[in-house]
Amino acid sequence: MSTLLDWAKALQNADGDEGLLIELAGVFIDECPEMMRQVRAAIDRRDARELRRAAHSLKGSAHIFAASEAGAAAFRLEEMGADGNFRDVEDGWTLLRFEVEGLLSELIARVGDRNPDETRDTQNS
C-alpha cells in the first residue's frame, strides 16, 4: 500500500463507487495545479485569509483520497493562514509540494494523466 494515498479507504469515502472515485481523481488531477497556484500566490502576497482558504480546499481534496501526509501538510499551511503566522511558511510550502506531487503521481498511475502540461507546471512552481 502506498503511503501517499490509501485507495481502499478512498473507495470507502466514495461509498464504494470506483467510477465516482476515478472521476474525482480526474477532477483533482485537472484542478490541483490551480489550487497549488492559489496557495503559492497567497504565500507570496502574505494573504493569511486566502492561504487558509486555499490550503483548506487542498486538505479536503487530500482527505477524499485518504492522503494523510498531503492533508497534514495542507492543514499546517491552513493553520498558518488562520494564525497569520508566515514564519515557517516556506518549509510548509516545500512539504506541501512534495506530498501533493507524490499524490498526483499515484493518482495519475491509477487513472491516467488527463492534463500533463498543467501537472508539470505544478512541479515548477
Image (spheres, grey):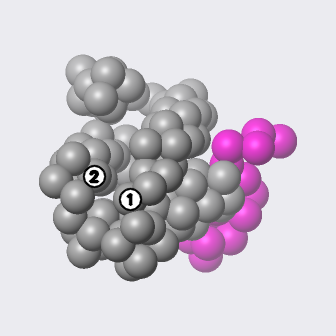
114 or 65, nearer to the observer: 65
Q: Which residues are magenta?
A: 1-18
Q: Is residue 121 visible?
A: yes
Front one among 115 and 82: 82
Q: Are marks 2 and 1 in contact (CB under 8 Å)?
A: yes
| Residue 73 image point, x, y percent | 56, 55
Question: Element at badge 1?
Answer: loop
Mark 2: which secondary structure? Answer: helix
Q: Residues within 10 Å of mark 2 (few under 14, many from 20)?
A: some
Image coordinates for residue 13, horizontal then vertical, percent:
61, 72
Q: Quadrant of the C terminus?
A: top left
Residue lying at 38% horizontally and 59% vertically, measured from the top left? 86
Number of the label disc, if any, that sits on residue 39: none
Residue linked to disc 2: 43
Q: Position of residue 31 (x, y in %)?
A: 27, 48
Q: Quadrant of residue 116?
A: top left
Nearest to N terminus: mark 2 or mark 1: 2
